């Protein structure tokens, strides 16, 4: 963690550990006595001045922002500003910062991946449904049109609710074995009409576990 302590009235640095000082282009000695504005630079000050005003007013503040290092490298930091009181009088504020660049990049990559999957699912004319242990978690528009239900009506329902009785054991065996080769079955529309389909299922990792994706083609 990057740690520093500033006086309330002067906003001058009274302490900084090596990581905090070097992160801003100083040493633990040369940063002492510098104001927040001087310590972090004009660009960063323009961004965080409203947060500094809040902590000076006695509020605990937590936020995430991008940070440009003295060498030009872009990082993402999580900042905690904690007011320090003595005898009910605020005398300073602690600064606790964690560099979360790696985590932020991983989360952004995941969001981008999910968005690509969403666009791919919506672009195809085949029905796609995601389920966890047989309970629907998501479905594309083609799947909704095939069955005649909205997404809200599908999510939380059992896959087997949409399978005719004569095909249920086939679907149960397929899901239980996590099989991935194509097979034929049928689904039930809202009207009760049976639609013959070819099904391909895939087991995908998610949040430390797995879920199933099934692609249905109207045959």
Image: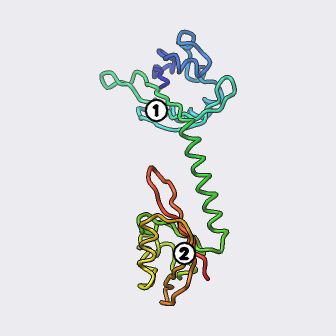
C-alpha separation, residue under disc 2 versus residue under disc 1: 55 Å
Q: Residue 128, position in %: x, y?
A: 57, 70
The residue sitting at the right extreme is 72
Q: Which residue is mark 2?
A: 183
SS for tag 1? strand
The residue located at (42%, 71%) in the rendering is 173
Q: Earlier in the sequence, mark 2 or mark 1?
A: 1
Left or right relative to 96: residue 42: right
> Which mark is in front, 2 or 1?
2
Crowding near the residue tagged with mark 1, few <14, some 14–19, many ≥20 C-alpha atoms within 10 Å: many
Q: How many marks?
A: 2
Residue 180 in the image: above or below residue 60? below
Which is nearer the eye, 4 or 102?
102
Residue placed most toward the observer, 8 or 70: 70
Q: At x 56% / y 14%, what residue is drawn?
A: 31
- Label pair 2/1, CB-CB below 8 angstroms: no
Q: Position of residue 187 (x, y in %)?
A: 50, 82
- The one of 160 and 151 positioned closer to us in this rendering: 160
Picture quarter containing residue 165? bottom left
Comparing 148 with 180, the one in front is 180
Seen in the picture, residue 150 relative to 105 is either above or below; the reply is below
Direction top: furthest residue = 29
Please provide percent x and percent y for residue 78.
51, 35
Circle 2 packing at 10 Å, graded few (<14), some (14-19), many (20+), is some
Left or right position of 128 against 60: right
Q: Where is residue 80 shown, x and y percent of the image? A: 46, 32
What color scheme is it? rainbow
- The residue shown at (43%, 85%) is 166
Hey, which residue is sitting farthest left in the picture? 87
Vertical comparison of 99 with 163: above or below: above
Residue identified by numbered label 1: 80
């Amino acid at each position: 963690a990057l740690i520093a302590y500033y006086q309330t009235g002067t906003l001058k640095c009274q302490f900084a550990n090596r990581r905090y000082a070097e992160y801003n282009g100083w040493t633990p000695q040369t940063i002492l006595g510098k104001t927040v504005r001087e310590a972090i630079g004009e660009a960063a000050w323009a961004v965080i001045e409203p947060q500094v005003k809040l902590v000076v007013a006695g509020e605990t503040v937590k936020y995430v922002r991008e940070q440009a290092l003295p060498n030009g490298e872009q990082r993402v930091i999580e900042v905690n500003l904690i007011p320090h009181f003595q005898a009910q009088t605020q005398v300073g504020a602690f600064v606790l910062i964690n560099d979360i660049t790696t985590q932020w990049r991983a989360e952004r990559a995941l969001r981008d991946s999910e968005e690509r999957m969403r666009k791919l699912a919506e672009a195809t004319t085949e029905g796609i449904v995601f389920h966890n242990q047989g309970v629907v978690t998501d479905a594309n528009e083609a799947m909704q049109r095939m069955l005649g239900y909205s997404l809200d009506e599908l999510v939380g329902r059992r896959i087997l609710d949409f399978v005719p009785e004569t095909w249920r054991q086939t679907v149960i065996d397929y899901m239980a074995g996590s099989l991935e080769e194509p097979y034929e079955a049928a689904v039930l529309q809202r009207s009760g009409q049976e639609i013959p389909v070819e099904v391909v299922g895939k087991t995908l990792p998610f949040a430390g576990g797995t879920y199933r994706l099934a692609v249905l083609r109207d045959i």
